[in-house]
Image (cartoon, rainbow, N blue to C red):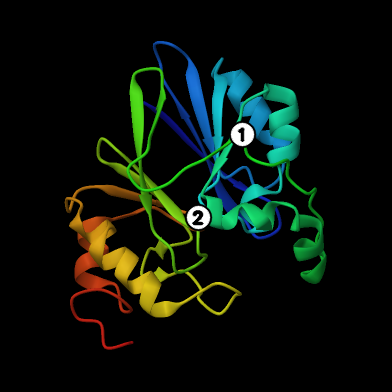
Amino acid sequence: MIIKRLAVGPIMANCFILGCDESFEAAVIDPGDEADKILLTLAEYKLQVKYIINTHGHFDHVGANKRMSEVTGAPILIHALDVPMLGQLSKSAAAWGMSADDSPAPEKTIDEGDEISFGNHTLSVLHTPGHTPGGVSLHTDGHVFVGDTLFAGSIGRTDFPGGDFNTLKASIQDKLFTLSDEVVVYTGHGPETTIGQERQHNPFVGQNANFG
């Protein structure tokens, strides 16, 4: 599987392009900004976007939804609980001194247990709320894309509307930490990590955590 990480926008959110190197179908996870940069990378690898997937509804992860959907014609997928955020992106971004286009409504909502296939690859949806009510993680063959649920040595913020620390902790420990140690965790900001590393050493939710 082709995996390309692009840090986009002023907050440097990670957008992931996942491609099948046989069919050249692709999924774009969290196109937060800089649509042209994402489109250029897709063209470089000759990939055709089948789905635009949002791990959650914050503007820095979905701000390029509109342009990406217009150019590629691909449907937007997001959990139902975060759909209301998509129509408030311009207002949310302005509160941070930034700009974003409001997103079109999703063509379909996704939830726990759903499967999203492109080419020879399938993503399994895990509902991992806590950072937002509709946060999801996407698991496939030794990889999991977690949005802002979990970071290398940290966790997502829970002080935004709809956030809750205990819910986030349960999502990580009951959903993500049940995956194998060697599964690579692709985070919404910053570098990759592994499930084993975070299960053992994460200071907020790991085995030796003293917080919460």
Residue in view at x 17 percent, y 54 percent: 181
Packing grade of label 2 (10 A; few <14, some 14-19, many >=20) is many
Q: Secondary structure at mark 2?
A: loop
Residue in view at x 59 percent, y 20 percent: 44
Q: Secondary structure at mark 1?
A: loop
Disc 2 designates what residue? Answer: 188
- Return the x and y of residue 137 as percentages of the image width and height: 40, 50
- Return the x and y of residue 101 as percentages of the image width and height: 80, 48
Kindly report the distance in space between the C-alpha atoms of the residues bearing marks 1 and 2: 23 Å
Amino acid carrying mark 2 in the image = Gly
Taking 35 as reference, is 199 above or below it?
below
Q: Which mark is residue 52?
A: none
Residue 146 makes an appearance in the image: no
Number of numbered callouts drawn: 2
Residue in view at x 55 percent, y 18 percent: 47
Packing grade of label 1 (10 A; few <14, some 14-19, many >=20) is few
Taking 152 as reference, is 65 above or below it?
above
Residue in view at x 29 percent, y 75 percent: 205
Q: Is residue 197 left or right of residue 20?
A: left
Screen quadrant of the C terminus? bottom left
- Return the x and y of residue 148 as percentages of the image width and height: 48, 61
Quarter-of-image position of residue 95:
bottom right
Q: Which sits earlier in the primary sequence, circle 1 or circle 2?
A: 1
Q: Is residue 64 left or right of residue 163?
A: right
Disc 1 designates what residue? Answer: 107
